[in-house]
Amino acid sequence: MKDFVPIVFALLTGLFWGTYGPVLAESRTFLKSPFKPYVAIGIAYLIWGIGGGIAGMLYKNDKFEGFTGPGMLWGLAAGTLGAWGALTLTLAMFNGGKPYVVMPIVFGSAVTVAALVGVWQTAGKTSVNPMLWVGILGIVVCAAIVAYNTPHVAPHAKPAEAPAATTGSPGPS
């Protein structure tokens, strides 16, 4: 059963991040700004990141000792990359991107980049299975199919204008 725990958390991550784009789009419609939601995202990261981290440390009986050096720098780098990802997603949506197009591209490219980083990290230590390249091509094709075929709501139509008032007689009597 313990082997399934990472899978459950990975699926939950997919659920959370998969709903991130559509929820961001909704936030933009209410706040009438592409960057006000980004500030709210930062506040949420601060609350959940620090609060969740401290709660996890308490659960594991971790101490703040040794909270410096390379581990801290890598953590800051990861947080920076996450924040930049949120910013560039905000910019994608701000520039007319629709969640049903942007999100498959985001997740398809994220999987691809993670795989390519793995290839780079193990360069010379192991061989790359050619099926990796088939999988990457498959991700590109599948992201395009998903983006193209996802049902979406048409933009709100402008209300019809009232007919212009006419002068003269009101018509036959």
Image (tube, rainbow, N blue to C red):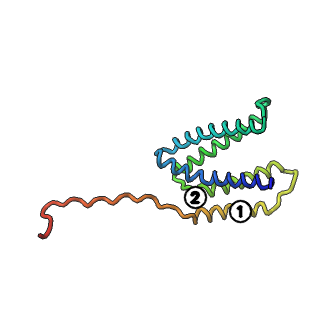
In the drawing, what numbered circle is on residue 137? 1
Disc 2 is placed on an element classified as helix
In the picture provided, is 125 more to the left or to the right than 71?
A: right
Q: Nearer the viewer, mark 1 or mark 2?
A: 2
In the picture provided, is 31 more to the left or to the right than 139?
A: left
Residue for badge 2:
101
Q: Are marks 1 and 2 in contact (CB under 8 Å)?
A: no
Q: Residue at x 63, y 42 (%)?
A: 83
Looking at numbered disc 1 in the image, what kind of residue is underneath it?
Leu
- Percent position (x, y) of residue 65? 79, 29
Q: Quarter of the image holding residue 60? A: top right
State which quarter of the image contains the C terminus: bottom left
Q: Residue at x 60, y 53 (%)?
A: 19
Q: Choose between 51 and 84: the one closer to the eye.
A: 51
Task: Please determine whether, in this image, residue 168 is positioned above or below residue 47.
Answer: below
Q: Residue at x 56, y 47 (%)?
A: 91
The crowding category of the residue bearing disc 1, from other C-alpha atoms within 10 Å (few below 14, some 14 to 19, many at least 20), is few
State which quarter of the image contains the N terminus: bottom right
Residue pushed farthest right? Answer: 125
- Percent position (x, y) of residue 55? 70, 38
The crowding category of the residue bearing disc 2, from other C-alpha atoms within 10 Å (few below 14, some 14 to 19, many at least 20), is some
